[in-house]
């Protein structure tokens, strides 16, 4: 690492804290001067992000490969193209999104102008996890910059190679007066959170989400919390097992299962399980070959801590498919577990790895009860050839997002809000929802000084005439 660029810092101890304070002060001054407000300035930053992606594609792809051994195809669809699409969308719609939004008026405000102004919050902090370290950096950043904010970015220290590329390269593409990067782990982030921000956008675990929200409460700072959890996947008896196996396995094992919206466990009848297991077996063999360890299509677990945690989960229930692991390579085979008890760790914590437990339920009602007894998930999946069954699951449960008969395709649509509910988070983003998240919606009424005679009927001394107003 070289630390010469003053727009980003790896800080430690008191001296570091002072320089973070100075950096935040500098960003605040930029914001107060109104520099980030014009559409042209915002567009220039967004174009910078686009150039950053194009100019450094290989470097970024290598970083993703080194951190997660992410296959290029997965990097392309889930990191680059989503970020590029968000940049493109924001650039195309920036002026329309920024426009004051006229609202209907009442009888008493007919002569006035009433509108919602979308104004930037000011200084925004974005905290990023390691699993989609480029997407989850750039997509919120697009929203924050499009909305005219100054931004402090805290990438994940765990995806080390991406952290390094972001720190060294990204600041060159953005105006130094409105953007800074702070590097570090839990301790440094804790210190950073003592400072006052105007908005905090956090993506990560529910445990750290609580820490962030507690710190934000001290300054009454609004937050978006994009968290995780266990995403149920209900498979009805009325399904084609091969199709379900393809779709569930693709989205479970994508990014080696390290996806916040991955189907976390399957709920199905014992009969469906009997049909699904051979289908999953042949799907996994088709996707990753007979020896998935040598497959170029399967990534690796991010670090030893997560590897050990996942290895522990392999001891839950009974291994029906896979189950092999190798610490030296942080390899875990695509695995399916059966005979799993609800009380076992694999059904208590978010799995975040290539392990799929199947839990048996006897009916749709029992599946819905099972889902509703637990925290509200970030995503929920229901598979059935009967649209009635899918509609029932949708109507009788709650989750951040929902997809019928597939995995996390709903996340790829920028016209849908993406975010959690309950324990899976609060707030939403993607597309215009990002712009709105990073904007204060200011309710404005503009009235002239005329018509005082008419308006004076509201003033005291009150008479029955006031009530007729
Ligand atoms: P994490 O909560 O451990 O870390 C996220 C960020 O918080 C990192 O930048 C980290 O440096 C910082 N951090 C860690 N400990 C901290 C502390 N004590 N105080 C302050 N900051 C701290 O999450 P992770 O392991 O990087 O990512 C995995 C989690 O993120 C999973 O739960 C997953 O579901 C969730 N996630 C959610 C989404 C979403 O969009 N909802 C997307 C990706 C990941």
Image: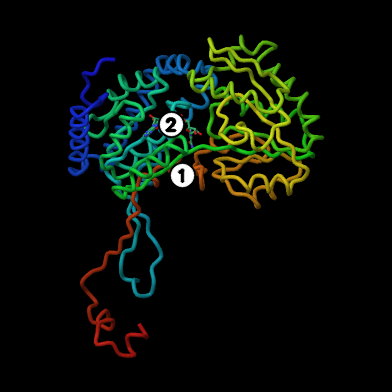
Cβ of mark 2 under 8 Å from ligand 1: the answer is yes
Answer with the quarter of the image where residue 438 lies.
top left
Q: Nearer the viewer, residue 73 or 271?
A: 271
Q: Position of residue 461 (x, y in %)?
A: 24, 87
Residue 32 visible, this orientation:
yes
Q: Nearer the viewer, residue 171 or 35?
A: 171
Q: Position of residue 413 (x, y in %)?
A: 53, 38
Answer with the quarter of the image where residue 282 lies.
top right
Q: Earlier in the sequence, mark 1 or mark 2?
A: 2
Q: Is residue 150 left or right of residue 356?
A: left
Q: Residues within 10 Å of mark 2 (few under 14, many from 20)?
A: many
Q: Is residue 108 above or below residue 57?
A: below
Q: Nearer the viewer, residue 317 or 374?
A: 317
- Residue named by callout 2: 136
Residue 84 visible, this orientation:
no
Residue drawn at point x = 24 percent, y = 34 percent: 178
Q: Secondary structure at mark 2?
A: helix
Residue drawn at point x = 71 percent, y = 16 percent: 285
Q: Quadrant of the N terminus?
A: top left
Q: Is residue 334 above or below residue 375?
A: above
Q: Is residue 167 left or right of residue 231?
A: left
Looking at the rendered structure, the number of numbered marks drawn on it comes to 2
- Marker disc for residue 67: none
Q: Secondary structure at mark 1?
A: loop
Give the image quadrant in which the ligand numbered 1 is located.
top left
- Residue named by callout 1: 428
Q: Position of residue 16 (x, y in %)?
A: 21, 27
Measure the C-alpha gap from mark 1 to mark 2.
13 Å
């Amino acid at each position: 690492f070289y630390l010469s660029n003053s727009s980003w810092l790896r800080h430690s101890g008191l001296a570091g804290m002072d320089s973070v304070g100075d950096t935040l002060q500098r960003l605040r001054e930029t914001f107060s001067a109104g520099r980030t407000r014009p559409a042209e300035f915002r567009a220039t930053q967004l174009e910078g992000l686009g150039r950053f992606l194009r100019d450094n594609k290989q470097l970024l792809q290598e970083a993703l490969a080194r951190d997660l051994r992410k296959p290029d195809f997965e990097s392309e669809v889930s990191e680059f193209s989503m970020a590029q699409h968000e940049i493109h969308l924001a650039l195309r719609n920036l002026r329309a999104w920024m426009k004051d939004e006229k609202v209907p008026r009442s009888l008493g405000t007919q002569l006035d102008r009433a509108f919602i102004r979308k104004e930037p919050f000011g200084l925004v902090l974005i905290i990023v996890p390691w699993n989609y370290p480029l997407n989850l950096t750039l997509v919120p950043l697009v929203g924050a910059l499009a909305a005219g904010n100054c931004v402090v970015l805290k990438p994940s220290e765990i995806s080390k190679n991406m952290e390094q590329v972001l720190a060294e390269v990204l600041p060159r593409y953005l105006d130094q007066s409105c953007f800074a990067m702070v590097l570090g782990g839990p301790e440094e982030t804790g210190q950073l959170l003592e400072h006052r921000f105007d908005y905090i956008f956090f993506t990560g675990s529910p445990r750290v989400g609580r820490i962030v929200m507690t710190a934000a409460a001290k300054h009454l700072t609004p937050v978006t919390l994009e968290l995780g959890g266990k995403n149920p996947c209900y498979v009805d008896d009325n399904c084609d097992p091969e199709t379900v196996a393809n779709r569930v396995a693709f989205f479970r094992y994508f990014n080696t299962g390290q996806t916040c919206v991955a189907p976390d466990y399957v709920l199905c009848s014992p009969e469906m399980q009997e049909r699904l297991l051979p289908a999953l077996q042949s799907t996994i063999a088709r996707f990753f070959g007979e020896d998935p360890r040598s497959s170029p299509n399967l990534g690796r677990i991010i670090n030893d801590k997560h590897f050990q945690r996942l290895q522990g989960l392999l001891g839950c229930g009974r291994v029906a498919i896979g189950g092999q692991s190798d610490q030296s390579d942080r390899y875990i085979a695509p695995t399916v577990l059966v005979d799993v008890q609800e009380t076992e760790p694999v059904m208590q914590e978010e799995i975040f790895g290539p392990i799929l437990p199947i839990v048996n339920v006897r009916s749709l009602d029992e599946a819905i009860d099972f889902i509703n007894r637990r925290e509200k998930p970030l995503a929920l999946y229901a598979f059935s050839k009967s649209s009635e069954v899918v509609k029932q699951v949708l109507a009788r449960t709650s989750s951040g997002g929902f997809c019928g008969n597939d995995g996390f395709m709903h996340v790829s649509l920028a016209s849908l809000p993406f975010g959690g509910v309950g324990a899976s988070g609060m707030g939403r983003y993607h597309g215009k929802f990002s712009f709105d998240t990073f904007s204060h919606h200011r309710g404005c009424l503009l009235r002239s000084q005329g018509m005082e005679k008419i308006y004076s009927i509201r003033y005291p001394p009150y008479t029955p005439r006031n009530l007729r107003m």
